[in-house]
DNA sequence: ACCAATGCTTTTTTT
DNA sequence: AAGCATTGGT
């Protein structure tokens, strides 16, 4: 008889009685050492699937069990979601106190501190966060102000400038060094670029905005310039743990070091073989040089794999062992059996989609839930065709990575309204809002927003400084300068434009904004904003119908917050990573397939994993070819993807037309990823090859020209019979 | 001078 | 799908 599950809403179990047994049961010796070495610096090298999360979870529980206050534990993870997951798990084996552990990303932690202490650096209360494209817009403004013509191809574009600035702050190198290394063709401009960086930084201050990198640099500045605060934080967070340490950059390591202080308790966990974020400044020396920073660090290695069957590990080990760098661990497992990873080549991506759909349906019918299967790929758009096929087949899925909905233009429009409420000096958002009106373009918009900045930085009735204590003064100023309610500064500025085509709309906007500012609840404000925005929206986007469902998504997110500013900033700092959901088939979200970029799949696992388009040019990607270090990162990317699988791994290689790219148009990429080829040089038996046969009796495509003779994929020397696979 | 519509190109990966 | 440059309209 089947037992139906029934969830009691609003009911959470009482805290378990304190467990007498220690939190080391079911752990191996290395894991136990990691859990129980609580004092001093500890470096844990944790291979893929080695129970890293479990170890961290047990360590939190163990610390609390020992009497450490949960509020003195800080857990830094890659996404806030994974921090929450861990703490939830810790509460299951320990007690609910672990839920009050502080956990999150570097950025969210920095944000939290800056909201509390940012005034020490001169930030006003409602500072807003610039995402990448906002930052680029602002940089474009600076670039123009400093006399670079837009069309001046010889001077770096705004995106390039943003990259240079980002690397400069994250990698502890001068702009000149970065330019020389990353884009030597711009070397002659490095002085001007440096000046622009200074101007950009000054502008952000003036506008009371921070970009992503500022969250980190400003936290660092705070720790340096406010020794008292630094000490206070050290005393508060006595036990610091950092997950995915291989993907941190020098700036983050510096923050950790200051936060921990000499003699502090720090555990970092990472895997040098899974470092995949060097492109944004991650530096593996944080791990390899950990001993130099913390000379008495204890080093622990977790190499036993509890996730995958041996045949999968054999292949992943072969892939990573060809790396230029040396990794001193080979994963092993005691999980017996398991099937060989499967390699399938196809004539095109449509065949690939058909295979994915059909195989998933079969496995699903065999009883594997969709939630235990994932389709992984290098870049967001690689899954486009598979998505169509899944939709047509009625298979529900969710997609992670690639384009995020928070970045789409219409969502940014909506958020711009909320952001000017929070920070009336945010000209980037003002420009977005203002340009929605007919007859109001870039020039007028930036004129108006510049006036607004001035107006809001000079309150109509300045307070006399000596009448108030210093602290109270700062606080009052902050409130004054951010209040859009009950003052006529908006009207004063907008009124100058009353005669223009958009004049009446502007005055209406001022009234509307004041009304919103008086509402507290994010859901209420958002609902009102959406109603106001809708006519503008429909005029602006000819595909408005397709975009409109996002209104509901946004309302849904707003409902989770009761504070406006928390809603606005968290959407940027901790964006919902899901970029697309298709549950049209079932209407429910209980059992859905995962599609994900490899980057977003980090730390997760599935029984069955498909890796799409394992073709040279996609993985490794074209852009990475020609640079040894980037190429090695691509290899590790493949390693990460393959080690997500616990039971079945399917490697798919369609021929791909390089339609749009830098490369020769019409070129067909048909060679399997070089990393696979290399891995199979010594032992081609690590894989099983399937060949696909169309249901109709069409002649099989000819792959003979795809491979060179020495190629392990050459069908001429594959002795075993290819498996027939019908469509 | 400024705005808006059009047509071309460009697409890694993410906090 | 969004950015960029061009062009035509006010």
Image (cartoon, coloured by chain):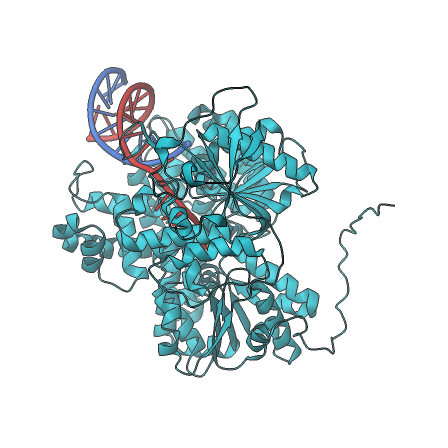
Chain colours: A cyan, B red, C blue
Please provide percent x and percent y for residue A687.
50, 46
Asked if A708 appears above or below A31 in the picture, the reply is above
Nearest to the observer: residue A181 or residue A445: A181
Quadrant of image for the N terminus of chain A = top right
Asked if A687 appears above or below A665 in the picture, the reply is below
- For the question of whether residue A656 can be seen, the reply is no
Number of marks in picture: 0
- For the question of whether residue A35 can be seen, the reply is yes
Task: Tell which residue pokes out farthest to the left in this image.
Answer: A188
Residue at image point 76% right, 51% down: A9
Nearest to the observer: residue A400 or residue A217: A400
Please provide percent x and percent y for residue A112.
48, 62
Q: Is residue A342 left or right of residue A680?
A: right
Residue at image point 57% right, 23% down: A695
Asked if A649 appears above or below A180 in the picture, the reply is above
Quadrant of image for the C terminus of chain A = top right
Asked if A408 appears above or below A545 in the picture, the reply is below
Q: Is residue A297 left or right of residue A606?
A: left
Task: Tell which residue pokes out farthest to the right in this image.
Answer: A1
Nearest to the observer: residue A561 or residue A330: A330
Nearest to the observer: residue A212 or residue A383: A383
Please provide percent x and percent y for residue A247.
41, 60
Residue at image point 26% right, 31% down: A664
Residue at image point 27% right, 35% down: A662
Please provide percent x and percent y for residue A426.
37, 48
């Amino acid at each position: 008889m089947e037992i139906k599950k029934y969830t009691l809403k609003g009911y959470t179990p009482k805290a378990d009685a304190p467990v007498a047994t220690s939190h080391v049961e079911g752990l191996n010796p290395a894991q136990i050492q990691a859990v129980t070495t609580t004092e001093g610096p500890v470096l844990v090298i944790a291979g893929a699937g080695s129970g890293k999360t479990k170890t961290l979870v047990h360590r939190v529980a163990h610390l609390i069990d020992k009497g450490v206050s949960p509020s003195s534990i800080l857990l830094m993870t890659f996404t806030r979601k994974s921090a929450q997951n861990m703490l939830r798990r810790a509460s299951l084996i320990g007690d609910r106190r672990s839920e009050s552990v502080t956990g999150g990303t570097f950025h969210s932690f920095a944000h939290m501190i800056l909201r509390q202490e940012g005034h020490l650096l001169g930030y006003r209360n409602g500072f807003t966060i610039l995402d990448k494209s906002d930052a680029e817009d602002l940089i474009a403004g600076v670039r123009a102000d400093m006399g670079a013509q837009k069309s001046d191809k010889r001077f770096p574009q705004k995106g390039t400038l943003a990259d240079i600035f980002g690397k400069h702050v994250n990698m502890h190198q001068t702009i000149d060094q970065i330019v020389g290394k990353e884009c030597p063709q711009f070397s002659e401009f490095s002085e001007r670029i440096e000046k622009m960086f200074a101007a950009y930084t000054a502008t952000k201050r003036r506008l009371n905005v921070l970009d992503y990198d500022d969250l980190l640099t400003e936290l660092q500045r705070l720790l340096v310039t406010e020794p008292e605060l630094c000490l206070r934080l050290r005393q508060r967070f006595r036990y610091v743990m950092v997950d995915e340490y291989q993907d941190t950059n020098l700036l983050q390591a510096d923050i950790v070091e200051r936060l921990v202080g000499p003699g502090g308790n720090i555990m970092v966990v990472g895997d040098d073989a899974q470092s995949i974020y060097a492109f944004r400044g991650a530096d593996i020396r944080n791990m390899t040089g950990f001993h130099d920073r913390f000379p008495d660090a204890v080093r622990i290695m977790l190499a036993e794999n509890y996730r995958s069957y041996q045949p999968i590990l054999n292949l992943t080990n072969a892939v990573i062992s060809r790396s230029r760098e040396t990794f001193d661990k080979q994963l092993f497992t005691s999980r017996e059996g398991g099937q060989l990873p499967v390699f399938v080549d196809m004539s095109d991506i449509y065949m690939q989609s058909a295979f994915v759909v059909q195989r998933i349906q079969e496995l699903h019918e065999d009883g594997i839930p969709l939630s235990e299967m994932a389709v992984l790929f290098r870049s967001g758009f690689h899954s486009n065709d598979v998505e169509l096929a899944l939709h047509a087949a009625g298979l529900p899925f969710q997609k992670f990575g690639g384009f995020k909905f928070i970045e789409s233009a219409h969502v940014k429009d909506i958020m711009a309204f909320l952001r000017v409420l929070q920070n009336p000096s945010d000209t980037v958002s003002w420009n977005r809002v203002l340009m929605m009106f007919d007859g109001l373009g870039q020039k007028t918009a930036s004129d108006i927003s510049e006036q607004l900045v001035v107006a809001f930085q000079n309150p109509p009735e300045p307070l006399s400084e000596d009448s108030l204590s210093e602290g109270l003064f700062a606080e009052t100023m902050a409130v004054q300068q951010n209040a859009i309610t009950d003052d006529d500064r908006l009207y004063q500025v907008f009124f100058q434009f009353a005669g223009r085509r958009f004049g009446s709309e502007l005055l209406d906007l001022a009234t509307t904004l004041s009304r919103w500012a008086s509402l507290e609840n994010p859901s209420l404000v958002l609902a009102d904003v959406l109603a106001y925005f809708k006519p503008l929206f429909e005029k602006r986007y000819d595909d408005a119908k397709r975009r409109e469902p996002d209104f509901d998504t946004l309302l849904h997110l707003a409902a989770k917050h009761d504070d406006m500013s928390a809603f606005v900033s968290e959407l940027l700092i901790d964006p919902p990573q899901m970029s697309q959901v298709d549950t049209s088939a079932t209407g429910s979200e209980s059992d859905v397939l995962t599609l994900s970029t490899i980057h977003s799949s980090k730390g997760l696992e599935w029984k069955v994993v498909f890796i799409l388009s394992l073709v040279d040019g996609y993985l490794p990607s074209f852009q990475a070819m020609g640079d040894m270090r980037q190429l090695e990162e691509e290899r590790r990317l493949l390693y990460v993807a393959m080690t997500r699988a616990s039971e079945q791994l399917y490697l798919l290689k369609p021929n791909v037309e390089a339609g749009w790219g830098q490369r020769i148009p019409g070129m067909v990429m048909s060679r399997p990823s070089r990393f696979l080829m290399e891995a199979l040089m010594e032992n081609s038996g690590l894989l099983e090859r399937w060949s696909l046969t169309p249901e109709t009796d069409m002649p099989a495509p000819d792959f003979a020209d795809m491979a060179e003779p020495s190629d392990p994929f050459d069908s001429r020397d594959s002795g075993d019979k290819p498996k027939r696979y019908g469509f």
